[in-house]
Amino acid sequence: MLRLKTRSPSGNFSPKTRKINLKRMQKEEFDLAVIGGGITGAAIARDAAMRGMKVALIEKADFASGTSSKSSKLIHGGLRYLKQLDIGLVKESLSEREILLHLAPNLVHSAPFLIPIYSGWKGRLEMHIGLFGYDLLASDSSLGRHSNLSPEEILREEPILRKENLSGGFIYYDCLVNDARLTMVTVKSAHEHGAVVANYTQAIGLDIGKEVFNAVKFREVMSGKEGVIRSRVVVVAAGPWTEELFKLHSEPGPAVRPTKGVHLVFPESRLKVNQVLAVPTTDKRLIFVVPLEQFTYVGTTDTDYTDSPDKILVEAADVDYLLDVLNHCFPSVNLGPDDIVSSWAGLRPLIMEEGDPSKVSRDHYIGLYDDGLAAIAGGKLTTHRTMAQNLIDQVLKRYAHLLEGNFQKCTTDEVPLTGGEMVDFPSYLRAQSLGLQGRWGLSLTSIEHLINSYGRNHMDILALGLSDRKLLEPLGPGCRVIKAQVIYGVEDEMALTLEDFMSRRTDLLHFNGGGGLEVVAAKLMGKILGWSRARRQAEIRKYRQTVQEMFHFKSGLS
């Protein structure tokens, strides 16, 4: 197997670690086995490991490859939940927003959100009351309070907004997040606290309550080899795959109502906004329009979904809906399908309720079954940490007779995620950016990208360039991602496929702009992972197929 001379400094969450973990899973006995490597499963593993439990976690694909990398990338209270009088969920979400700002300050960033109002004084009054309540529920927040804007002030902020019937608007504050990287650092933090973790490891059988230890039969996806995890308690945290996993067990689990959320990405040259906008729709929803570097992404839809959760595609109807909203709100831009440069579609694993998908509760459900089988479903990205805390609290109480040992109380709200160990992130970012630009010869864009993506761990990536300066080069002209990130993605973040790196260790899949970066990344990954030329070409073809699938909607356009 070919190896690069330069290796990641820590190298403690690598493919080699994964092989060791798969062996450990079959030889050792665990207190808790978690099925699902999205944000909820990762948070459960981290919480349990930090309390002193012996934890195993398996994910059938890559970490965050499902719902957890396909959200609106917001950490927010949820204004519309306030309108639905779900006060408890909003308060919990706002509290968690503040906690996450401290746990992962490099990934969770506050931002102004602008809401234009087109429904006259009554609409302005209703929104003002709602935002006053939002501020009141977030009384301990470090973010600013909302402010009222006149129509003239709104148009100075966002001149391309529709002027007709504009009666004013508001600015309030919430947070943006890189959802895939938040999941990645949560998984890695669980690992650093002792959890035994493996991606591309699928649960194929459950044997519950027949012996002292429950059994999770698994298949290692890459090789097809099978094994068994023996654990006192098993937790299913599989999102849209929850019901599918419970088919492996005789007892039915929680009923899930998957709803589909679609986002579209446009180049800044076709849709330029100066801050996040929450624009109203004719069906009384809010669509977010979010600037991100040279792009603007827009979403989301909310429709029931009954097909396989393994491949969710953006359909023509999804695109038509979002384009209609955009062209109504921004009449001068005249956006069409050809302006879309990427897209994503994900599923919300909501708890089964009747009625309009947008009105179904975003609260979570915990099921505790006989003999040490538990499940969690529903919830929001924002509340993942407290969901995990609630589940482990209940597991320790319900299954005390199965678990041995005195486990600690939850401290996940106090201990930063890996890389997030800084008190004042804006000051840290400024100081590091100024100090590193001259020393390493990187663009300011690349340095800020590294610090935002990896926090304090960015120095591990830069250290790779000490013996090979070529690793500090960008993957391609104008690209903010450098070659050393590929090495780090494999050796320190368990990336096993090209798509793992392009889509989840970085966000190049959706915010790339082209340029054949996948070829450069595949060559670097192949050297570390020992890929043959044929395997490397296969990885490139598979990735390009994923790119093509982002434009599936064009096949349904008239």
Image (spheres, rainbow, N blue to C red):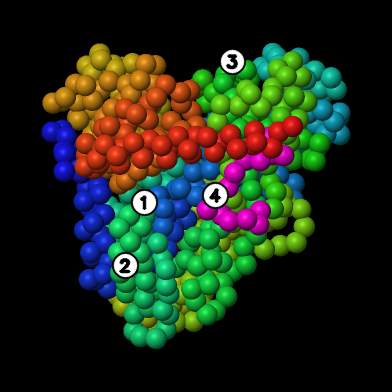
> Which stretch is magenta?
305-319
Task: Point out the image quarter for the C terminus.
Answer: top right
Quadrant of the image occupied by residue 58: bottom left
- Distance between mark 2 and mark 3 Cα atoms: 50 Å
Who is closer to the viewer here, 131 or 259? Answer: 259
Q: Is residue 485 above or below residue 248?
A: above
**Pointer 1 or 3: first along the chain:** 1
Marks 1 & 4, CB-CB < 8 Å contact: no
Q: CA distance from mark 3 to mark 4?
A: 30 Å
- Whichever of callouts 1 and 2 sits on the residue coming sooner in the sequence is 1
Disc nearer the start of the sequence (4/2): 2
Seen in the image, is 26 located left or right of residue 180?
Answer: left
**Image point (23%, 56%), residue name:** 19
Q: Secondary structure at mark 3?
A: loop
- Helix, strand or loop: magenta stretch: loop
Q: Which residue is mark 1?
A: 187
Badge 1 amino acid? Val
Q: CB atoms at circles 4 and 2 under 8 Å apart?
A: no
Instruction: Relative to 187, say whether 435 is above or below.
Output: above
Q: For the residues marked 1 and 3, what is the alpha-carbon distance in whole angstroms?
A: 36 Å
Q: Which residue is mark 2?
A: 226
The secondary structure type at the circle numbered 1 is helix
**What residue is pinned by disc 4?**
311
Circle 2 — which element? Answer: strand
The correct choice, above or below, for 415 with respect to 373 in the image is above
Say which mark, if any, is on residue 269: 3
Q: CA distance from mark 1 to mark 2?
A: 23 Å
Tell me where residue 509 appears, x and y as whole percent: 46, 33
Amino acid type at mark 4: Lys
Nearer-N-terminus badge (2/3)? 2
**Numbered disc in front, either 1 or 4:** 4
